[in-house]
């Protein structure tokens, strides 16, 4: 089979590509504009294209490779930043996804796998269940919700087969730890590597279920090839939830030191973690790696990384209400 992975330089894309080339004979084509990922994270056996989905002619790839499966991971997943870059957020998520949906229908792919987000649940009661009606509280969650619905309608009207994955707080090797707006565990590691304290928004009682990438890769693969996953929405992630403060304490223990500084509270869901039954039944998900062990692996990797410049947004679309720590 010929497989397309968008966002292949990111955490999910790069690790899934590694798994596919190591365990199958399939051809992997990857596209990424490297705005949020790094070329050295992409497996050398991948046919890589430095493309922006909206700006470049990706249709020629569909023509050349006749893809069987499309894994659409490309997105700038900075939920907290999205209220201050609304136009970018909708273009980067919704408009980009609509182009992939159109090409997937036009060229008759077998299945489109889309990574949505826990953000679609918003302030629903935890643990989040797939049957809950979405209640997003920010533009990022709204965009992901709209993408999900567009994909479902494409299935109803055009026969597109799909699987929607709602991952949550995935972390691990090849994550972008140089972005100050997303990936909290990576942000903390980068701060410690640069001699800075770990920062918490508010009192640190917010609860999340962190998910090690090594536990998620094979289920992501099965989302594209297993008949059980056809036209299913599936939560994917760790089964143990912890407070943000507890996660910070665990990381400090793993790193052998560090200080915590508490910042102003930001607009966010207080508790966000989900049920995992469907991922076990349909994708054979197994939660093998606890937070301490996963952070140990990621920290060992992070210490070997080159010193990269931290990403900072050049100009916000809106600065009204912008948090002091992002100014």
Image (spheres, rainbow, N blue to C red):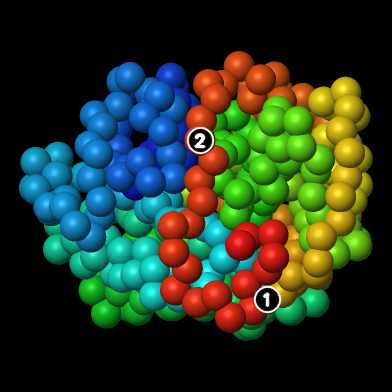
For the image shown, how many numbered marks are present on the structure?
Answer: 2
Quick one: label 1, few (<14), some, or many (20+) residues within 10 Å? many
Q: Do the residues bearing badges 2 and 1 touch, measured as CB atoms within 8 Å?
A: no
Residue identifier under label 1: 122
- Residue 272: percent from left, percent from top: 75, 64
Q: Which mark is residue 309?
A: 2
- Residue 62: percent from left, percent from top: 15, 48
Q: Which residue does the image show at 77% across and 25% down from the upper left?
A: 296
Going by the picture, which residue comes out furthest to the top?
Answer: 304
Marks 2 and 1, how far apart in space? 32 Å
- Residue 69: percent from left, percent from top: 31, 47
Which quadrant holds the N terminus? Answer: top left
* Res 308 seen here: yes
Give the mark toward the camera: 2 or 1. 2
Quick one: label 2, few (<14), some, or many (20+) residues within 10 Å? few
Q: Which residue does the image show at 65% across and 55% down from the upper left?
A: 168
Q: Is residue 190 above or below residue 246?
A: above
**Image-based side of 119 in relation to 127, left or right:** left
Which sits in the foreground, 12 or 219?
A: 12
Give SS at disc 1.
loop
Give SS at disc 2.
loop
**Image-based side of 228 in relation to 193, left or right:** left
**Image-based side of 257 in relation to 224, left or right:** right
Q: In which quarter of the view is residue 67 placed?
A: top left
Q: Which residue does the image show at 60% across and 54% down from the upper left?
A: 181
Which quadrant holds the C terminus? Answer: bottom right
Q: Which mark is residue 194?
A: none
Which sits in the foreground, 270 or 262?
A: 262
Q: Which residue does the image show at 23% across and 45% down from the upper left?
A: 51
């Amino acid at each position: 089979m010929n497989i397309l992975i968008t966002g292949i330089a990111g955490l999910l894309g790069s690790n899934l590509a590694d798994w596919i080339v190591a365990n199958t004979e399939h051809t992997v084509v990857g596209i990424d504009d490297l705005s949020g990922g790094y070329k050295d994270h992409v497996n050398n056996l991948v046919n890589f294209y430095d493309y922006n989905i909206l700006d470049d002619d990706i249709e020629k790839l569909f023509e050349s490779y006749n893809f069987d499966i499309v894994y659409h991971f490309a997105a700038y997943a900075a939920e907290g930043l999205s209220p201050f870059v609304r136009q970018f957020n909708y273009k980067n998520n919704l408009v980009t996804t609509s182009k992939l949906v159109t090409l997937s229908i036009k060229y008759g792919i077998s299945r489109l796998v889309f990574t949505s987000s826990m953000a679609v649940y918003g302030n629903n009661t935890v643990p989040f269940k797939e049957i809950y009606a979405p209640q997003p509280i920010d533009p990022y969650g709204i965009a992901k919700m709209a993408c999900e619905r567009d994909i479902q309608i494409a299935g109803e009207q055009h026969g597109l087969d799909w699987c929607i994955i709602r991952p949550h707080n995935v972390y691990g090797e090849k994550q972008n730890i140089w972005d100050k707006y997303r990936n909290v565990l990576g942000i903390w590691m980068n701060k410690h590597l640069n001699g800075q304290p770990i920062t918490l928004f508010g009192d640190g009682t917010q609860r999340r279920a962190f998910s090690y990438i090594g536990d998620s890769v094979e289920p992501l693969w099965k989302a594209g090839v297993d008949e059980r996953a056809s036209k299913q929405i599936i939560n994917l992630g760790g089964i143990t939830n912890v407070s943000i403060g507890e996660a910070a304490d665990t990381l400090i223990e793993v790193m052998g030191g560090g200080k915590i500084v508490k910042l102003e509270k930001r607009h966010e869901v207080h508790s966000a973690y989900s049920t995992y039954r469907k991922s076990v039944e349909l994708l054979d998900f197994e939660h093998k790696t606890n937070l301490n062990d996963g952070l140990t692996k990621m920290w060992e990797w992070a210490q070997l990384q080159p010193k990269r410049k931290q990403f900072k947004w050049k100009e916000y679309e809106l600065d009204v209400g912008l948090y002091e720590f992002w100014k």
